[in-house]
Amino acid sequence: MGHEIPSSCFNPEDLKLFHERLQKETKIINQWFTESRFASEQRMFGYELEAWLVDANYQPSPVNEQFLKMLNHPLVVPELASFNIELNSLPQFLGGHVFSDMQQNLDQIYNLCRRQAQLLGSDMLAIGILPTVKKTDLSLDNMSNSPRYRALNEQVLRLRQGRPLQINIKGGEHLRTQHDDVMLEAAATSFQLHLQVPLSLATRYYNAAIILSGSMVAATGNAPFLFGKHLWEETRIPLFEQAVSVGGHRIDVEGDLKRVFFGTGYVKDSLMDCFQENLEHFPVILPVLFEESPDKLAHLRLHNGTIWRWNRPLVGFDDQDEPHLRVEHRVISAGPSVVDIVANAALFTGAAKSLIELERPPEFDLTFNHARHNFYQAARLGLAAELYWLGDKSINAREHILQHLIPLARSGLEQLEVRNEDIQYYLDIIEQRIKSGQTGTNWQQRYAANHGYDMQALTAAYAKLQQSGTPVHEWPV
């Protein structure tokens, strides 16, 4: 979905041709899996951070077109709404002082973006859901000026036969509303991690990402409010699932799968399972026809980009046009501060490394249904959730993170030969966050309770503290 497309207009012949090319490319990638044609492990990782542009009153500021033109930075790109942008990283080698480097680089690009936004009377903010965003902000008038977003909206509504999208989220309060387009998706902003994985370990890494999803949501929540209502601890999860609610082929024996979903199970044989599922279960949304060689997989990659598993397999190409596999972990909220974001990255990458090195695959000791249960329980209840862990035993989320997740991350980072000072510094931030109970979500809830649920005041205080650079567990209320 990150690539521009020439037009948002399609006809039945486009759909037919796209599907034929998708079938051909799926056969090609299947052959690559059979022949082990993917790059070996290079221990590379990267990230995407979605952020908001806000005005002087901390309302969404729809100026990303002008902002991006003035900034002119290849790693900063538009998102669905004209008040959203995305900051990308170059691939980084996973070892040594990678996380302190990540903090330095993210601080640099974050501050560059802030300065540019300020020249437009705006600022930049990283948060799971902007507390001040209103339903009226999420209109087609505020869609980024891009054919791919117009096409996405038109094709989602085509598959829904024009029916509006229904939002029904029941948490601390109950939100029921409907929307005539996909712009509600723009209210959910995240921090997405990409791990390049060797073919021999790709299945293990993908399943490890699934296993860790509930734990990561509990540890990193930062989205309790939407339209002034206190909903889930991580409201971004149900919002995104319902904002692009399009099913699969209704005649499938497995039912009408949703395009934003946790998955249908662990991968058994290889990540090819996911690409085969894409072909068989999901109708094409964007039938853009490319003239590239079939072995560039242009149609397969675009189709995969319109299926939003919370953990998603990706195929990329290096400078020598050799294909590689990545696992995209999509469950973490944007924010609260740069140092928190880096700590979240260290927690996940270290824990994933530990899990894939276990002699007995951990997916044998945690059922997929329990992994999925963990994900939605953590999204609803945050650190108060009861989670299942290996052996399918139930444990409180806070105890689980302190007793299991942080030690796993420490061991994994040591195996990756990350600098000891980085391991200690970033995992200590996670430990203090969990011991204090003050995630981004918890801070927002406490601030709102103490200040009469004034969302503008909350956002102003949040912005000031984010800009201070201190981790969220140290933020005063």
Image (spheres, rainbow, N blue to C red):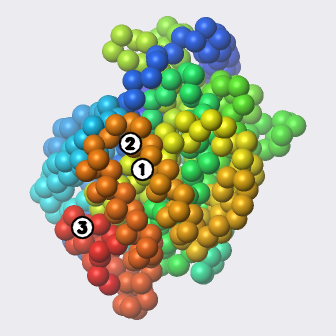
Residue position marked by numbered label 1 in the rendering: 410
Report helix, strand or loop for mark 2: helix
* Residue 264 percent location from the top left of the image: 73, 42
Q: Residue type at mark 1? A: Arg
Image quarter where the C terminus lies is bottom left
How far apart in space, not on screen, are marks 1 and 2 (Cα)? 6 Å
Residue position marked by numbered label 3 in the rendering: 470
Residue position marked by numbered label 2 in the rendering: 414
* Residue 173 percent location from the top left of the image: 60, 81
Verify CB contact (< 8 Å) between mark 1 and mark 2: yes
Where on the picture, by quarter, is residue 251? top right
Question: Which numbered mark, 3 or 1, is in the foreground of this view?
Answer: 1
Q: Residue type at mark 3? A: Thr
Q: Residue type at mark 2? A: Glu
Report helix, strand or loop for mark 3: loop
* Residue 357 percent location from the top left of the image: 55, 36
